[in-house]
Image (cartoon, grey):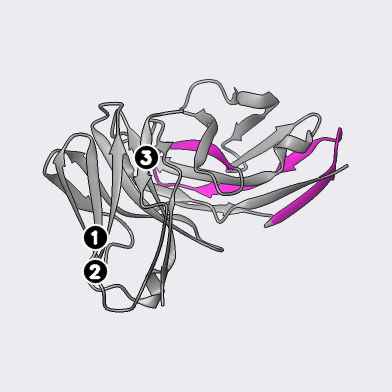
Amino acid sequence: AQSVTQLDSHVSVSEGTPVLLRCNYSSSYSPSLFWYVQHPNKGLQLLLKYTSAATLVKGINGFEAEFKKSETSFHLTKPSAHMSDAAEYFCVVSSYSSASKIIFGSGTRLSIRP
Amino acid sequence: DAGITQSPRHKVTETGTPVTLRCHQTENHRYMYWYRQDPGHGLRLIHYSYGVKDTDKGEVSDGYSVSRSKTEDFLLTLESATSSQTSVYFCAISDGGQGVDTQYFGPGTRLTVL
């Protein structure tokens, strides 16, 4: 069985400060892990994904995430927040073998203060 | 952006009426998916297709049916809409069907059932 927990439903940071969005997962298989971003009234866009290669994954717009098997975590970080980063972020766990066994987290809304 | 369109983008209907949502892709991807997005739940898979006329159920398939007669089109039908089906519906596509394959999302359809 698989599950994913996003530990914060809402995170607020000041522009120029670091961003940390937390995600813990559970999987009986070797998981694939993703972060997607959703801007208001838009579809989801892939930020980055982990597929058992390098544990530190770099994505678009300066985001990165580190796969930590011992902690079952896949936290998303960015060194310096920008106003355009305000959006909803989803952590996703998937079975390596089947895209139909895909579980979305409940989302973290990121707000950026000027 | 991947060539995915959804129609209609917004729909208001009454309980008990049939509703069909359309997803159209120009990427010639084999896999197509329908999700619903509800507050606090992230996205949940309704049905998916792994080829023309090949479909299977997802996590929340009750009350929904799908059809795929052409590679580019994937239809989601609510035979008799209920208020619990008020949601935002997203179509996604992927080239492969494994969990490592990136899914590309359409812009969404906001459905309100009165």
- In x, y percent, where is residue B42? 51, 55
Give the camera-side residue of B63 and A65. B63
Three-letter amino acid code at the position of disc 1: Thr
Q: Earlier in the sequence, mark 2 or mark 3?
A: 3
Q: Earlier in the sequence, mark 2 or mark 1?
A: 2
**How far, Cα to Cα, is label 2 from label 3?**
21 Å
User: Pointer 3 indicates a residue of which chain?
Assistant: B
Residue at the image position 23 percent from the left and 40 percent from the top:
B73
| Residue occupied by mark 1 | B77
Query: Looking at the image, is A66 positioned above or below residue B84?
Result: above
- In x, y percent, where is residue A71? 62, 42
- In x, y percent, where is residue B93? 33, 36
Query: Looking at the image, is B62 positioned above or below residue B5?
Result: below
Q: From where the camera sits, is residue B79 visible?
A: yes
Question: Hey, which quadrant is residue A72 in on the image?
Answer: top right
| Residue occupied by mark 2 | B18
Numbered badge on residue B5: 3
**How far, Cα to Cα, is label 2 from label 1?**
7 Å
Left or right: B60, with A38 as reference point: left
Q: From where the camera sits, is residue A96 visible?
A: no
Q: Residues within 10 Å of mark 2 (few under 14, many from 20)?
A: few
**How far, Cα to Cα, is label 3 from label 1?**
17 Å
Three-letter amino acid code at the position of disc 3: Thr
Q: Which residues are magenta?
A: A10-38
Three-letter amino acid code at the position of disc 2: Pro
